[in-house]
């Protein structure tokens, strides 16, 4: 009986010492540890040939739904909400996001790097440059 009491008190002491080290508030969620890039990103600026095109939209968002599916969600001012579904791939070592999208019968493929929850899409269309900056919501 005395052995059981000593064993229980040692276990309780260890638990009291170890539990404060496991701070649930500051520990990351399972998603943040495994796939922190899976999130919704909002467009913070968008220019085409130097002209601000973001002012024509209520919002433009990219939603990484899971480890392969992506949605581009946007709404023009005075227009309806649109969702374009596509797929993407991400190199977790280099954090390079690659996606392909079809618009008006043309296929566009772009690769960008996610850094600190932000990325930039830069694509030449004709003689003008489209530059879109996104950040995690």
Image (tube, rainbow, N blue to C red):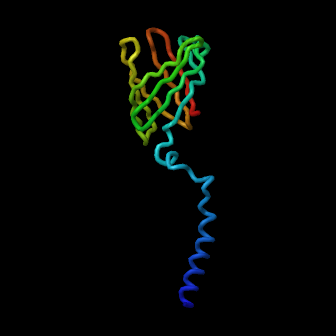
The part of the image, by quadrant, that contains residue 75 is: top right
Location of residue 36 with respect to 45 vertically, above or below: below
* Residue at figure coordinates x 61%, y 63% from the top left: 21
Q: Quadrant of residue 85?
A: top left
Name the outermost residue toward the bottom. Answer: 2
Residue at 53% across, 36% down: 115
The quadrant in which the N terminus is found is: bottom right
Nearest the viewer among 31 and 95 is 31
Residue sitting at x 47%, y 33%: 64
In the image, residue 115 above or below residue 109: below
Rendered image quadrant of residue 59: top right
Answer left or right for 90 relative to 51.
left
The correct choice, above or below, for 72 with respect to 4 in the image is above
Q: Where's residue 57, x and y in %?
A: 58, 16
Q: Is residue 57 above or below residue 31?
A: above
Q: Residue at x 53, y 15 (%)?
A: 80
Closer to the camera, 6 or 21?
6
Pinpoint residue 51: horizontal percent, then vertical percent. Answer: 58, 11
Is 38 on the left or on the right of 55, as rendered? left
Q: Position of residue 132 (x, y in %)?
A: 54, 21
Number of marks in the rendered image: 0
Screen quadrant of the C terminus: top right
């Amino acid at each position: 009986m005395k052995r059981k009491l000593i064993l229980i008190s040692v276990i309780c002491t260890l638990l009291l010492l170890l539990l404060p080290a496991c701070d649930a508030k500051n520990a990351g969620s399972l998603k943040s540890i495994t796939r922190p890039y899976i999130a919704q990103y909002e467009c913070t600026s968008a220019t085409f040939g130097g002209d601000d095109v973001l002012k024509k939209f209520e919002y433009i968002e990219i939603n990484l739904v899971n480890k392969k599916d992506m949605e581009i969600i946007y709404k023009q001012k005075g227009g309806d909400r649109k969702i374009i579904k596509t797929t993407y791939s991400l190199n977790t070592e280099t954090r390079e996001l690659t996606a392909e999208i079809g618009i008006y019968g043309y296929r566009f493929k772009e690769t960008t790097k996610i850094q600190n929850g932000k990325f930039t899409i830069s694509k030449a269309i004709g003689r003008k440059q489209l530059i879109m900056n996104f950040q995690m919501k």
